[in-house]
Amino acid sequence: MVRIGFFVALSHTLGWVYTFAWSASFYPQFLLNLKRRSIQGLSVDFLALNPLGFASYATYNIVLFSSKTVRDQYRRRHDGHKPLIRPNDVAFAVHALVISSATLLQAIIYRKTMTQTISTYNRAFIGLALSSILVVGLFAATTTSSFAWLDLLYFLSYIKLYISTAKYIPQAYLNYKRKSTVGWSIENILLDFTGGFLSLTQLVLDSWLESDWRAITGNPGKLGLSFLSIGFDILFLLQHYVWYRHSSQSLLEASSSDTNDIDDPDREDLIPNSAGGGSTERSRLLA
């Protein structure tokens, strides 16, 4: 019993530490945007998809944690076992929805500095996702349907997993195109990786404690989100520390130099010559 009690306490600790790390991972980017008064270097697709994804994930966790009807549906499909949704899972999802919405609000406020727009594909996806949620919800509400409310929650978790994939790919491509990670907070990635690893560890440990290994795949939202976070974070770490390390440093130094020059009122050569040549690409990147 002492041994089991230790692992239960360990699970709780892992859960709240992952919740803190994953929640904290949102703030470096939020504060960086606030400091720069700009979202340049940050994918608008990332910003627009995040709130929808976390709204889906928060609903998935809240209902699966608190609804007796849905928990009974889960037990009937999993040989009487309960769903492995913890209070820290709910806390993380709700907080993530709030802070991702606040970050999207930053994009709206700083729209004068924006040179990007959400892609047509992702605009269509958002509309399709919302319509699909409504349709699946109607099926779940129909007593003659083979769908149950649990199926709607699983559908919401799949939307979150798709969005997690779709929101990271534009950012990875943007970093690749610019050959730089300037404007993309690496602290965000370090915390996100920690959260993903600890979340996965808690899920595996809880499944062992419940003697129910099927519970790992029975929580597709938590399992998939952990794997996606770990995988993309490794990619971003490689971009930041290995592939684009020198180009990012050069861009930062150039940005610092240009800022100092602009603050110097005696620098007349900063006035652009409309008749002269020269590339404006760096200016667009640093805007």
Image (cartoon, grey):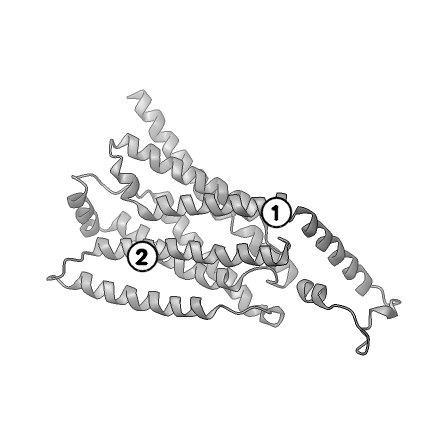
Q: Residues within 10 Å of mark 2 (few under 14, many from 20)?
A: many
Toward the top, the furthest residue is 2
Q: Which quadrant, please, contains the N terminus?
A: top left
Which numbered circle lies on residue 156?
2
Q: Quadrant of residue 75?
A: top left
In the rendered image, the residue lying farthest to the bottom is 275
Which circle's residue, 2 or 1, is located before the other in the chain?
2
Q: Is residue 102 left or right of residue 152?
A: right
The image position of residue 28, as x and y in percent, is 57, 51
Helix or strand or loop: what does disc 2 sit on? helix
Image x and y of residue 142, in percent = 15, 64
Q: Residue at x 89, y 67 (%)?
A: 266
Rendered residue at 38%/56% (across/down): 162
Whole-percent x and y of residue 219?
30, 45
Q: In the figure, residue 109 lies in which quadrant?
A: bottom right
Q: Residue at x 53, y 69 (%)?
A: 117
Circle number at residue 223: none
Residue 165 image point, x, y percent:
43, 54
Residue carrying label 1 = 240
Does residue 283 sit above or below 75 in this rendering? below
Residue under the point 43% across and 43% down = 19
Amino acid type at circle 2 is: Leu
Residue placed furthest toward the right: 266
Q: Classify mark 1: helix, strand or loop.
A: helix
